[in-house]
C-alpha cells in the first residue's frame, strides 16, 4: 500500500524536474501547446498521475493530492508565462523587421461607375422645378390610349396616333408617346391647386441621328386660380436662367398642341454662336436663326380639364414638356442621340 505513494510522488518529481526545459525548448506557440498537451491533456502525463490518485489510501490522499495540485498549478503558470514570452518574441521580431515601404504605388483602384449624362441632365431639370415648388409625379409607360391621347384632346384620327408614330400594344393600350399622360393622371387623382414635375421615358416610332424610339421627357404643369401666360413665361425664364445661365434670352413662338390653348414652342438663345456683345451670328446648330427650340408649352385647354373632372371656369393652368436627350445634346454638343444608348465606356467616361 505504501508502495503506491512513492510511485506517484516519483512520477511527479520526474515531471517537475523536466517540464521547464521542455517548455523552454518549444520555440513556437504551437510547439508549446503540443508540449503542454502531453502533460496536461486528456492523455497527458499529469492527467495519468491524477488518475492514480484513486489508488491512494484515504489517509494519505489529502497530502498527496495537495502535492499533485501544487505541481499542476506550477506547470500551468509556467505554460502561461512561456506563452507570453513566445508572443513577445514574435512581436519584437515583427517590429525589428524592415518597415513597410509606404512609397510603393497603390494597387489600381477598381473602376467606379458614375451617372449617365441623361440622368445628370434629368436630375438637374427636376431639381430646378422642385426648388420652384413643383412635386415629382410618376406615370405609367404603358398607358391607356385615352390618357395618352383622348382626354388630351387628340381626335381619333390625329396623325400622332397613327401606327407610324405610336407603338400600340393592344387596341386601347399604347407605349406612351409623351409624358403629358401624367397631366391626365394627376388631374384625375388630385384636386387643384397642384404643381407637378414628371420625368419619364417615352416611345415613338422614330430612329435617326436626332431621334431615338425610346427617349426621355420632363413634363411640368401647374393648376390654380387665375393662372396666366405670364406665370408660364416667368417659370420658363427662371428655368432658362438656372439651366443655361443668367440672362439667357427666351422667346415664345405660337405653336399647336391639342391639349393647350394658346400653345407655344420655347426657344433659348443659341449658346453656340453667342458673341461677346450678346448678339448672335447664327450657326449650323441653330440653323442660322440664333435660337434653339427646347420645349413645348401652353395654357391647359378647357377640354382637358373637363375630361378630367376639373371645372375650367374656376381653374386654369399651364403645362410644358421638354426632351431630355435634346437638352443633353445641346449642353454637351453631341451630334448623335444614339451615343446615349450604346453604353460605350469611352463615351460615358467623359461626363
Ligand atoms: N407633349 C408634348 C410633346 O411631346 C410637349 C408639350 C407638353 C406641349 C406640355 C405642351 C404642353 O411634344
Image: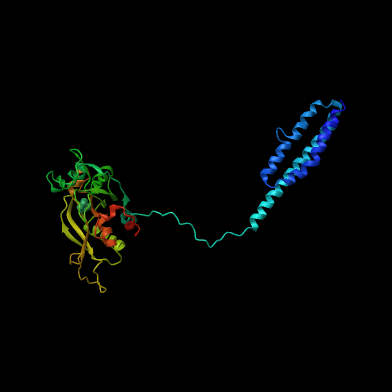
Using the image as rendered, state which of residue 185 and residue 333 is in the foreground: 333
Q: Which quadrant: the N terminus? A: top right
Residue lying furthest left: 157
Q: Is residue 243 above or below residue 22?
A: below
Question: For residue 323, which quarter of the picture?
Answer: bottom left
Using the image as rendered, state which of residue 84 and residue 179 is in the foreground: 84
Residue lying furthest bottom: 277
Q: Position of residue 55 (x, y in %)?
A: 81, 26
Q: Position of residue 52 (x, y in %)?
A: 79, 29
Instruction: Please tell me which residue is depicted at 67% across the width and 55% down the height of the picture.
Output: 92
Q: Which quadrant: the C terminus? A: bottom left
Q: Is residue 254 above or below residue 27?
A: below
Q: Is residue 124 visible?
A: no
Using the image as rendered, state which of residue 348 and residue 150 is in the foreground: 348
Q: Is residue 43 visible?
A: yes
> Would residue 344 appear left or right of 31 to someone viewing this image?
left
**Total numbered labels:** 0
Q: Position of residue 63 (x, y in %)?
A: 85, 32
Q: How is the image coloured?
A: rainbow
Q: Position of residue 214 (x, y in %)?
A: 24, 49
Instruction: Please tell me which residue is depicted at 66% across the width and 43% down the height of the picture.
Output: 30
Amino acid at each position: 500500500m505504501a508502495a503506491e505513494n512513492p510511485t506517484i510522488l516519483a512520477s511527479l518529481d520526474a515531471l517537475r524536474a523536466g517540464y521547464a526545459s521542455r517548455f523552454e525548448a518549444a520555440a513556437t506557440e504551437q510547439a508549446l501547446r503540443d508540449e503542454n498537451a502531453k502533460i496536461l491533456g486528456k492523455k497527458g502525463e499529469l492527467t495519468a498521475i491524477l488518475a492514480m490518485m484513486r489508488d491512494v489510501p484515504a489517509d494519505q490522499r489529502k497530502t498527496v493530492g495537495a502535492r499533485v495540485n501544487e505541481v499542476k498549478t506550477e506547470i500551468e503558470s509556467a505554460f502561461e508565462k512561456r506563452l507570453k514570452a513566445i508572443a513577445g518574441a514574435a512581436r519584437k521580431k515583427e517590429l525589428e523587421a524592415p518597415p513597410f515601404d509606404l512609397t510603393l504605388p497603390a494597387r489600381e483602384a477598381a473602376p467606379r461607375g458614375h451617372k449617365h449624362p441623361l440622368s445628370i441632365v434629368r436630375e438637374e431639370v427636376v431639381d430646378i422645378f422642385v426648388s420652384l415648388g413643383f412635386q415629382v409625379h410618376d406615370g405609367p409607360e404603358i398607358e391607356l390610349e385615352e390618357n395618352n391621347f383622348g382626354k388630351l384632346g387628340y381626335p381619333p384620327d390625329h396623325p400622332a396616333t397613327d401606327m407610324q408614330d405610336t407603338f400600340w400594344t393592344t387596341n386601347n393600350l399604347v407605349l406612351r408617346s409623351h409624358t403629358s399622360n401624367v397631366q391626365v393622371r394627376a388631374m384625375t387623382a388630385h384636386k387643384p391647386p397642384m404643381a407637378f414635375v414628371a420625368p419619364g421615358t417615352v416611345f415613338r416610332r422614330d430612329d435617326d441621328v436626332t431621334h431615338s424610339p425610346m427617349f426621355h421627357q420632363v413634363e411640368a404643369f401647374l393648376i390654380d386660380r387665375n393662372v396666366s401666360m405670364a406665370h408660364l413665361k416667368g417659370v420658363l425664364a427662371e428655368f432658362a436662367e438656372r439651366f443655361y445661365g443668367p440672362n439667357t434670352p427666351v422667346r415664345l413662338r405660337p405653336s399647336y398642341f391639342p391639349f393647350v390653348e394658346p400653345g407655344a414652342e420655347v426657344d433659348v438663345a443659341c449658346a453656340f454662336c453667342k458673341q461677346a456683345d450678346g448678339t448672335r451670328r447664327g450657326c449650323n446648330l441653330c440653323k442660322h436663326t440664333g435660337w434653339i427650340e427646347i420645349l413645348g408649352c401652353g395654357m391647359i385647354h378647357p377640354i382637358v380639364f373637363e375630361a378630367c373632372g376639373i371645372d375650367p371656369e374656376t381653374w386654369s393652368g399651364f403645362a410644358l414638356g421638354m426632351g431630355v436627350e435634346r437638352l443633353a445634346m445641346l449642353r454637351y454638343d453631341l451630334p448623335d442621340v444614339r451615343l446615349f444608348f450604346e453604353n460605350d465606356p469611352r463615351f460615358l467616361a467623359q461626363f
